[in-house]
Amino acid sequence: MAEWEGKSRGTPLGYRIFVFILSNFGVYPAYLLLTFVAIYYVFFSSKTTPHIISFYTKRIGWSKLKAWWKLYVTYHLIGQTLIDRVAVTAGLSKQIKTALQGNENIKELVKRNQGGILLSSHFGNWGIAAHRLMNYGSDVNVLVYDTEHEQIKQYLSGVTGGIKFKAIVIKNDLSHIYEIGEALQRNEVICMTADRYLPGNRTVSAKFFNEEALFPAGPFQLIKSFKVPYTFVYGVKTGLTQYDFFAKPIREVTPKTTLQDIVNDYAQDLEGMAKKYPEQWFNYFDFWKK
């Protein structure tokens, strides 16, 4: 997975344009502008397009014609999720609505007051899902890669007022492990994605879409080591301005639970979501590359 470097694409100018449109005209004109951006990526994003087409044809089973149409759809959707994230966190639009499925699972996790880990993925709108967690009455810590372009990060911080949850930055010296341990000892909730890793990271293999794929070992090892309850969360776009927030039933860690058990559970759940919403799994590289 050397294609992924832990940062998103985009420029400060691009963000300024979309924030200006959001502030003055709302999300619909911003979506309209995305039409041209998505078309550009279909024809000129040579690094990602082959992997997306391969995923749609080999894993989902679509024809090449349908895969190319869905390629445009997924580029448009990822643009929408970025716009929606800014709109929600900055309070620039009230048009974005969310519905909750599995609300009781998050409430139960917080009510136990023993800490917990929420595993997500680069699926749907992770930013809105994390923002939505702020309403559950518990300190939320989100594990992040601090490799976003500095100008973009500073600009969005100025627009949104900064993130509202606690950010634990993943560092090469592994000091973030201590921060996670301290947060769990305070019975706080840790949120992290578990479907990408950087070159050199320790990995673990699991069956995913009928073939072995590599996942980062870190998130799953944390669950096993700290023996805290965990579950899976997603924020999926189900309408033009509608999101469904999914929180799956709580999983328990017992003395018999192995690292492989947790990885297999996650891979199976993510596969089910990716089959249902294939255009919203935004992993644009060869996930099965050995």
Image (cartoon, rainbow, N blue to C red):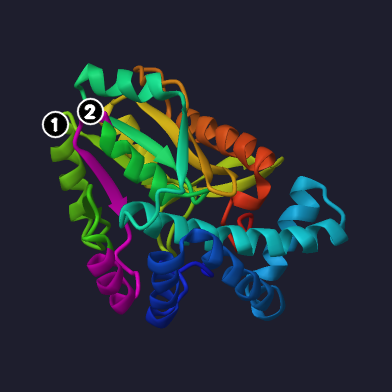
Q: Residues within 10 Å of mark 1 (few under 14, many from 20)?
A: few
Q: Give the range drawn in magenta.
A: 136-159
In the displayed structure, does residue 164 sit left or right of residue 278? left
**Residue assigned mark 1:** 185
Mark 1 residue type: Gln
Can residue 1 be seen?
Answer: no
In the displayed structure, does residue 245 sit left or right of residue 223? right
Is residue 62 depicted above or below 264 in this figure?
Answer: below
**Residue assigned mark 2:** 115
Q: In which quarter of the image is the C terminus?
A: bottom right
Q: In which quarter of the image is the N terminus?
A: bottom right
**Disc 1, SS:** helix
Return the x and y of residue 172 as percentages of the image width and height. Answer: 26, 63
Which one is in front, 61 or 198? 61
Return the x and y of residue 288 as percentages of the image width and height. Answer: 64, 55
**Looking at the image, which residue is at 71% across and 40% down?**
210
